[in-house]
Amino acid sequence: MADDGSQDGASASSTPTLTSIQESISDLKTLLAPVLALDAKLDAVRKEMERTSAKNVKLFGLLQTKCDTLVRQMLAVEEGQKKTHKMLQELTKAAAKAEKSAAESAAPVKSAEDRLKAASSLSATISQAMRNEEVEARRSEEEEPVTSDPSGSLSSMNYFARQMDGDRWANNLLLVGDDHWQSLKTTEDVGAELKRMEEAEKDLNFRVQARPGCLVGDLFDRDRGRMLVAVPARVAKVAISVGTKDLLDDSLSTLQKASLEEVRKANQPPLLRKAEALRDMVAYLLDQKKTVVLLLPPIGEQRVEVAHHWCELVLEATASLSASPAFRVINLPEVMMRTMTDFKTHEDFLRRWLADATEGPRRFLSAYGTRRLFDLLKRAGKDNP
């Protein structure tokens, strides 16, 4: 009986303990309910922030594209204003010339004797010109048997002499730098002409020494003041193309990160250092009695604001050298901008000048752009451009 009593007491004492545990669990659930609800809300907020962030990235991309288009349109407007101003000047000159002609026509009519003298002088001039042509024709007929060699050797010599005269711009010319010189070889007709000139090394001494992704620092050591590429003593002219890869440096700011004013302020120091290094390289070559042709690279589809800033700094840095007739600049961005009004849309302009890229934005010249560059190079390479 005693044992039964003790068991009842133990069960009685354990019953309140279970009840209190259940009550505690219920209290904890009550306390955790707001926390769980708050966690659910936080999860919803986090998802909403992720969606907003994705939208912002897309909006930034659209903003970058619109800013690039706006910059190009501003430049096109500026170029249009220059053309309009030039046209007004020409119209003013034409009006002045018309007034002068009207005044001359209002002058007293010459006498019959004066008109007869003028007609006699004109007739004598025409007769002399006709006699000169006859003399030249007879001289050509007399020399014809000498020049018409059956083997064709003299004709071949004359052909190659004319060819050499046409290639004079490339005589002792070295192209150094980046992809833009290398792209000349990828256009069929231009590449064939370059190959022909390179094979005539003994006669022309024309060479292309370029590699993709070349930087300013790969060509010139500013600290030591010397070239990092070989420039043979026989070379008289050096054409430099560099800067395209330098403008893709991740440390440079773009419109995706800040406003145009802040971008230019942040990029001023690094771009200026590169521009001054380029100036020192040009000055070094001029001191070596070389003619230097500097190519300002085309402005691609991306980082338009950085490219324009680079061109401005290079022109400012090399302004002190521009007085030298041995220093010439091919301002390709300016040449491109002059043609912008010739196209209906901005996309047509880019498609005409720039080649389609396998990946990323367009940065290098199309076949049309390459031919235009080659023509500009020929002009700059002449002794008296």
Image: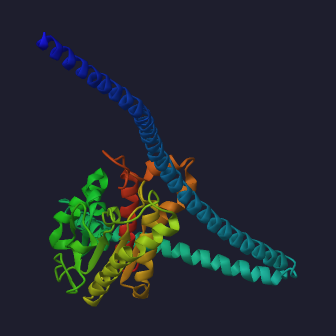
Q: Where residue 121 appears, x then y in whole percent?
A: 67, 81
Is 346 on the left or on the right of 35, as rendered?
right
User: Can you say which quadrant of the picture contains the N terminus?
Assistant: top left
The residue shown at (30%, 56%) is 190
Colour approach in the figure: rainbow
Left or right of 280 in this view: 82: right
Q: Is residue 44 visible?
A: yes
On the image, which quarter does residue 364 sit in?
bottom left
At horizontal 56% and vertical 56% (from top left) the residue drawn is 70
| Rendering coords of residue 191 (x, y %) | 26, 56
Q: Is residue 311 visible?
A: no
Residue farthest to the bottom, as pictured: 287
Above or below residue 203? Residue 318 is below
Near-viewer residue (217 or 125): 217
Q: How many marks?
A: 0
Residue 287 as seen in the image, left or right of residue 89: left
| Vertical order, 138 against 359 (above or below) | below
Q: Position of residue 133 (x, y in %)?
A: 49, 72
Residue at x 27%, y 64% (from the top left corner): 178
- Furthest toward the front, the residue is 1
Please identify the quarter of the rendering in which residue 107 is found: bottom right
183 over 281 or under it: above or below: above
209 vs 29, nearest the viewer: 29
Q: Is residue 102 above or below residue 350?
A: below
Q: Nearer the viewer, residue 139 or 278?
A: 278
Give the x, y percent position of residue 308: 46, 67
